[in-house]
Image (cartoon, grey):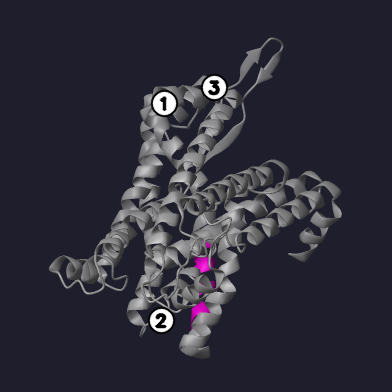
Amino acid sequence: MLSPLVAAFRTPDLRKKILFVIGIVILYRLGATIPSPGVNYKVVNECMDQINSGDNQVYALINMFSGGAMLQLAVFAIGIMPYITASIIVQLLTVVIPRFEQLRKEGQSGQAKMTQYTRYLTVALALLQSTGIVALASRGQLLPDSCKGDVLSDESVFALTIVVLVMTAGACVVMWMGELITERGVGNGMSLLIFAGISARIPSEGKAILDQRGALAFSLVCVAALVIIAGVVFVEQGQRRIPVQYAKRMVGRKMYGGSSTYLPLKVNQAGVIPVIFASSLLYLPQLILQLTAGSNDTSGWKKFMNDYLTDPTSWSHILLYFAMIIFFTYFYVAVTFNPEERADDMKKYGGFIPGIRPGQPTADYLGYVLSRITLPGSIYLGIIAVLPNVFLDMSSGGSASGLNFFGGTAVLIMVGVGLDTMKQVNSQLMQRKYEGFLK
């Protein structure tokens, strides 16, 4: 493992790319710790200490994706999530809007226009999200009720506007950083920034588990995390390879085709997107309940929400979470993978699956295989995602956020990003006749 790393740093252009990525990540983490103007940093730190020792799933989710920057109202508080949300929305709209579908088929020029639309939508979402966060902070509803003191030292319209503009500009800078990493560095820039945010929280969350539950529980959590990581790596590498044969054809005096290849269909074709969708929708009731119901509210609606929906240890919450992940896995795979389009592309270039006729029979076969491998992939995503909730139910209290960082969504993201980055480094090493990371 160390020899390919040494070989990577010995290669001048690859070394520059790796150091460039490290520099951008350092700048990103620096911006995630600098508070926005007008924020009472002392009060925010006291509230963060209470949140880290609590069991609030909404705060745990926000902390995980923002690296703790959002609740601190930092310059990069919004982070990369507006860009990811905009990318998913634009990708889903290609099925609904014919113009987007046409742009997607135009190649590089169409992709450039789609990227520009994604940027515009990112700015709009960042402005909307930063406005909502500042409004909640000024009303005292962003952080728990137990936090004492004003988070914002100046609540005038001008001061609040400055904070909103700073956070929106920070989100645009983060988007620019991610695109720079993708263009000039190694790996996917947006994914690496999320990876950096999650990794930055692991030491503090591990210390919280060690302080609250002791060395034995911390050791068990670490062992369980290693087992989960091994299982995630095994499934993420799994794929169904469908053989594809290309017929020979003459173009002028040259003969093309006649080769055999395969079409890889991953077991986890949807990635971590279904987990993000399900998490966001499932935590909306708890967020609405926090904003609308008071601390002394004893209504039946609040009791029902607390017992069956917002309690992460309740089996109704776990089963609903699991079912939503399976649904969104099938939904996202159906949107992003079109068997008819793949079958038409194969037929256009003279490719066929042995034993299957080109055209509609090939599309039907691809759809059948995809539906068969999506089921275990969705069950795998659901099991990994609900593991922190099951651990909480079997344990005697503790921090939900800590378990989220050692299992569940965080592990899926970190392992997926790590494997993708290693594959890109490996491909560049193989071009220079070095032995890669993945043998």
Question: Looking at the image, can residue 306 be seen?
Answer: yes
Tag nearer the camera, 3 or 1:
3
Tell me the crowding category of disc 1: few under 14, some 14 to 19, or many 20 or more residues within 10 angstroms, Cα based. Answer: few
Marks 3 and 2, how far apart at CA: 52 Å
- The segment highlighted magenta reads 220-232
The rendered magenta stretch, by its main secondary structure, is classed as helix
Magenta region includes residue 224:
yes
**Residue 415, which numbered label?**
none
Determine whether label 1 and label 2 are within 8 Å by CB: no
User: Disc 3 designates what residue?
Assistant: 106
Tell me the crowding category of disc 3: few under 14, some 14 to 19, or many 20 or more residues within 10 angstroms, Cα based. Answer: few
In this picture, residue 197 sits left or right of residue 20: left
Amino acid on which the number 1 mark rests in the picture: Arg
In this picture, residue 368 sits left or right of residue 48: left
Marks 3 and 1, how far apart at CA: 28 Å
In this picture, residue 55 sits left or right of residue 236: left
Determine whether label 3 and label 2 are within 8 Å by CB: no
Secondary element under disc 2, as helix, strand or loop, is: loop
Amino acid on which the number 2 mark rests in the picture: Gly
- Reply above or below: 278 against 299: above
Amino acid on which the number 3 mark rests in the picture: Glu
Label count reads: 3
Q: What residue do we see at 53% from left, 57% from top? A: 77
Residue 361: x, y in percent?
A: 37, 28
User: Disc 1 designates what residue?
Assistant: 357
Mark earlier in primary sequence (1, 2):
1
